[in-house]
């Protein structure tokens, strides 16, 4: 299906027949924003290929998680700041009240968050924690525990390509905050990039503070 055919199928109720038109529109807007708009189809194409491994597979879930978080700045901030800080402190439980406290601190810098009602903030906190559980960053129904998600080599390659496209080079790639989405240290990032080099997807050399990174595989072509 083309993107326009997919949109028509969603809005006409063929894919979500029990949802109201308003909800179908919301579903479409979310899917389109997170997965179909960026990178001129590369993301959607890679996700489609990953479904061959199953929708619960690391290949699919880690890619879906990556773009969910990259395209939602609040989720990005919660994982790379709040959850990462707790992970490093080995304080592995996370709750809605803690997310609400984080949002309260965010009101100092964000006029948008400041406008949200308490009920909106609570709903967002619950929704984001539920999504992170589905993506494997959290586990548990009532008491949620932080865990390191399983990340596919394809997701690592995608994030590397995103960072390079954003103008990161050399050591700046390894130091990018985006890797905290996977709860990775700089050494974890280096190991993952070394794995891509073994697959001959990239050239990667690291010596001291010097890092050399070059793509061998192009983003449009699968491994």
Image (spheres, rainbow, N blue to C red):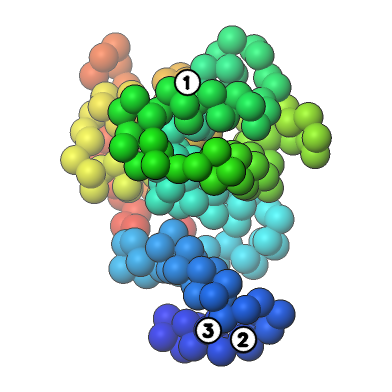
**Location of residue 13 with respect to 49 vertically, above or below:** below
In the image, 32 versus 169, the foreground residue is: 32
Tell me which numbered mark, 1 or 2, is placed earlier along the sequence.
Answer: 2
Alpha carbon of mark 1 to alpha carbon of mark 2: how far?
44 Å
**Location of residue 67 with respect to 107 vertically, above or below:** below
Look at 55% across and 38% down and name the residue there. 118
User: Is there any visible trace of residue 86 in the rendered image?
Assistant: yes
Residue 11: image tag: 3
Within 10 angstroms of label 2, few (less than 14), some, or many (20 or more) residues?
some
Horizontal and vertical percent for residue 95?
67, 28
**Location of residue 83 with respect to 11 vertically, above or below:** above
Residue 13: image tag: 2
Callout 1 touching callout 3 (CB < 8 Å): no
In the image, 205 versus 133, the foreground residue is: 133
Secondary structure category for the residue under label 1 = loop
Within 10 angstroms of label 3, few (less than 14), some, or many (20 or more) residues?
many
Secondary structure category for the residue under label 3 = helix
Instruction: Determine which residue is flagged by label 1.
Output: 185
Horizontal and vertical percent for residue 164?
25, 43
Look at 48% across and 63% down and name the residue there. 30
Q: Nearer the viewer, mark 1 or mark 3?
A: 3
Instruction: Judge left or right: residue 38 versus residue 19.
Output: left
Instruction: Judge left or right: residue 35 versus residue 20.
Output: left
Horizontal and vertical percent for residue 119?
58, 43
Alpha carbon of mark 1 to alpha carbon of mark 3: how far?
42 Å
Horizontal and vertical percent for residue 121?
54, 40
**Location of residue 163 with respect to 85 vertically, above or below:** below
């Amino acid at each position: 299906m083309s993107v326009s055919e997919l949109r028509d199928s969603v809005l006409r109720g063929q894919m979500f027949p029990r949802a109201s038109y308003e909800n179908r529109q919301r579903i479409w807007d979310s899917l389109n924003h997170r997965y179909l708009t960026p990178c001129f189809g590369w993301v959607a194409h890679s996700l489609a290929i990953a479904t061959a491994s199953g929708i619960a597979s690391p290949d699919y879930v880690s890619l879906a998680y990556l773009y969910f978080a990259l395209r939602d700045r609040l989720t990005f901030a919660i994982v790379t700041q709040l959850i990462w800080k707790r992970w490093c402190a080995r304080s592995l439980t996370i709750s809605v009240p803690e997310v609400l406290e984080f949002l309260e601190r965010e009101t100092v810098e964000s006029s948008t968050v400041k406008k949200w009602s308490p009920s909106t903030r609570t709903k967002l906190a619950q929704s984001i924690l539920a999504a992170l559980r589905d993506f494997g960053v959290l586990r548990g129904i009532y008491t949620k525990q932080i865990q390191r998600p399983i990340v596919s080599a394809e997701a690592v390659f995608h994030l590397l390509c995103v960072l390079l496209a954003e103008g990161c080079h050399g050591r700046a790639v390894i130091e990018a905050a985006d890797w905290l989405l996977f709860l990775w240290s700089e050494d974890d990032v280096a190991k993952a990039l070394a794995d891509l080099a073994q697959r001959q997807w990239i050239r990667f050399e690291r010596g001291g503070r010097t890092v050399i990174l070059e793509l061998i595989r192009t983003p449009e072509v699968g491994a």
